[in-house]
Amino acid sequence: MRLRALSKRVQQLELSETYAILDTVRKLRQQGEDVVDLGGGEPDFRTPDHIVHAAVNALAEGETHYTASRGTQALLEAVAHKYKKEHGLDLDANRNIIITPSAKHALFITLMTLLDDGDELIVPTPSWVSYKAMAAMAGATVKAVPLDGATGFRLEPEQLERAITPRTKAILINNPNNPTGRVLSREEAQGVVQVALKHGLYIVSDEIYEKVLYDQSRHISMASLEGAAPITVTISGFSKAYAMTGWRLGYVVGSEDICGQLLKVQQHTVGCAGSFIQRGGVAALEGCQQRIAEMVVAYKRRRDRLISGLEHIPGITCRAPEGALYVFASISDLGFENSMAFTRWLLETVKVAVTPGTAFGEGGEGYVRLSFAGSDEDIDEAIRRLHYAFQ
Ligand code: PMP
Ligand code: GLU
């Protein structure tokens, strides 16, 4: 018997490079290797206690069944309240929001809903690893708009315009950006909205790092800009701001029309997010926000430690990220064949895990991403090992 081939669409995908590094580090540690992990964007903080207690109570009270596919009323209202308070947006909890098991799933149902076979999704790059694969699962392709590191990865509306074809459906923006750490200025964000409105395109705005901001940076939610709300699908979640990566909880905000279509994909895939998990989400949004502020202070300290450590290594240059959890450092002057070769060498010689810039698409070659989501000790140890490697 000769078994038929698996789906071409899936076979053509690559495994996630960020997960590959998470898995490699886990495996090496199981073998007793002393690896310092600056690979994944995994906060080392525990989820704040009041959030954990809310979910534990929900479990104890028997909240262990399906919820409405859109999400529990309490969490939908908490999200609507957040957008009113933080961005002045008037959302109808039952029409404009869908709670999803992770921001990743929120993106997946969004791209499945927006994209048809042969469509194009414009993505400024370097960009997070999963957008391209998700677009491919929807039968579409990503049209990369490589941004220039020399300008600090500034986004010019003309660059987006030049990438538009009759097959373009949407522009995907990740702000604050993983991996570059860029936070868009109001002017840059307005530029995106103007281009999208002019050409009848949707905007997918991945704002998962919205709370992770440094110095004077301010997060502008794309949907709050004039004319943007009807064409924008906002993606966010709890993983980064509340150190809840393992909970798998996120959400989509969009027009009633789009959310109505998204709901079909949600209902026929996961159905709903976990019931007791959603109780944790309510506690996160409505409880005291002090822990977030403390975590961001710690991330800023770690960012500064990492940057000042890297500054003393000749051949490595980087700029301080304005948001998110990563330093995107140029290594092109170090003389390695490419960023993957550097990444492998670093892991082999001094057991420091980082992510090669090429994982983030066009414009990523010559860079590596170093995550500072881990502990202060890990960052100090990584710097010590880097100095040793380059002495
Ligand atoms: N978007 C970006 C830019 C990310 O870095 C990640 C990874 N955390 C996600 C979305 C997905 O987040 P979640 O853990 O909620 O799936
Ligand atoms: N988003 C994190 C990262 O970029 C976690 C891994 C993933 O979901 O891709 O490292």
Image (cartoon, rainbow, N blue to C red):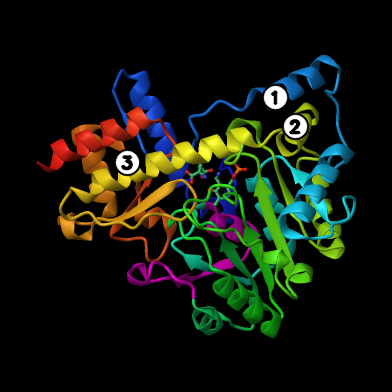
Q: Is residue 331 above or below residue 391?
A: below
Left or right: 242, with 78 as reference point: left
Say if the magenta span includes residue 244.
no
Q: Which mark is residue 50?
A: 1
Assign the C terminus to one quadrant of the image. Answer: top left
Quadrant in the rendering for residue 192? bottom right
Mark positioned earlier in the residue sequence (1 or 3): 1
**Mark 1 and mark 2 residues within 8 Å of each other at the beta carbon:** yes
Query: Is 147 located above or below residue 88 in the figure?
Result: below
- SS for tag 1? helix
Direction from residue 253 to residue 118 in the image, left or right: left
Quarter of the image for the N terminus: give it. Answer: top right
Type of the residue with mark 2 = Ala
Q: Earlier in the sequence, mark 2 or mark 3?
A: 2
For the residues labelled 1 and 2, the Cα–Cα distance comes to 7 Å
Amino acid at circle 1: His
Q: Which residue is mark 3?
A: 305
Magenta residues?
130-155
Q: Amino acid at mark 3?
A: Arg
The image position of residue 13, as x and y in percent, is 51, 53
Distance from label 1 to label 3 (Cα)? 30 Å
Instruction: Indicate the quadrant where residue 99 lies.
Output: top right
Q: Is residue 299 left or right of residue 123?
A: left
Residue 283, disc: 2
Q: Is residue 154 magenta?
A: yes
**Residue at 65% from the left image edge and 80% from the top image edge:** 194
